[in-house]
Image (cartoon, rainbow, N blue to C red):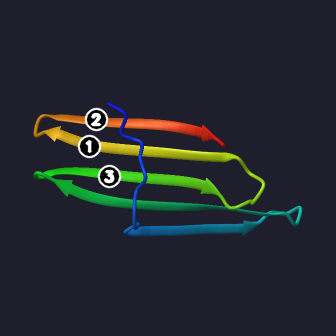
Amino acid sequence: RDLIRDIGTPSLIVLARARRSDGIQQGYQLTGSVESSHGRPEMHLRLVDLKEDSIWKMCVDAAVPKPHKAMVLYKPEHE
């Protein structure tokens, strides 16, 4: 089952930016949401580089289909 999908309106947004010692700015944005369908929680996280020319992206989706089972899908992406 492919869990990676649009996360909709995020319930969590974290921005991390820094200026390196060589003067270059670097940063990442983490967005996430948690849903519960039919009593089963699902979590969706997406981490992207803040550089406009970057093609790097990481997505992580997790679900608990049954009380004794959990699924996690990690997918690095290049646009």
Residue 2 x %, y %: 37, 34
Q: Is residue 18 left or right of residue 70?
A: right
Q: Which of the 4 quarters of the picture holds residue 60?
A: top left
Q: Which of the 4 quarters of the picture holds residue 63?
A: top left
Q: Is residue 49 left or right of residue 40?
A: right
- Badge 2 local density, few (<14 within 10 Å), some, or many (20+)? few
Q: Secondary structure at mark 3?
A: strand
Residue drawn 37% across and 69% down? 11
The answer to whether mark 2 and mark 1 are in CB contact below 8 A is yes
Residue at the disc numbered 1: 63
- Badge 1 local density, few (<14 within 10 Å), some, or many (20+)? some
Q: Secondary structure at mark 1?
A: strand
Residue drawn 87% across and 66% down? 23
Q: Which of the 4 quarters of the picture holds residue 16?
A: bottom right
Check residue 27 in the rendering and tell me which mark sits there, or answer none: none
Mark 3 to mark 1 CA distance (whole Å): 6 Å
Q: Is residue 27 left or right of residue 19?
A: left
- Badge 3 local density, few (<14 within 10 Å), some, or many (20+)? some
| Mark positioned earlier in the residue sequence (2 or 3) | 3
| Mark positioned earlier in the residue sequence (2 or 1) | 1
The answer to whether mark 3 and mark 1 are in CB contact below 8 A is yes
Residue 68 x %, y %: 12, 34
Residue at the disc numbered 3: 43
Mark 2 to mark 1 CA distance (whole Å): 5 Å
The type of residue carrying mark 1 is: Ala
Check residue 71 in the rendering and tell me which mark sits there, or answer none: 2
The type of residue carrying mark 2 is: Met
Q: Residue furthest top?
A: 1
Residue 54 x %, y %: 74, 51
Above or below, 6 relative to 60 = below
The type of residue carrying mark 3 is: Met
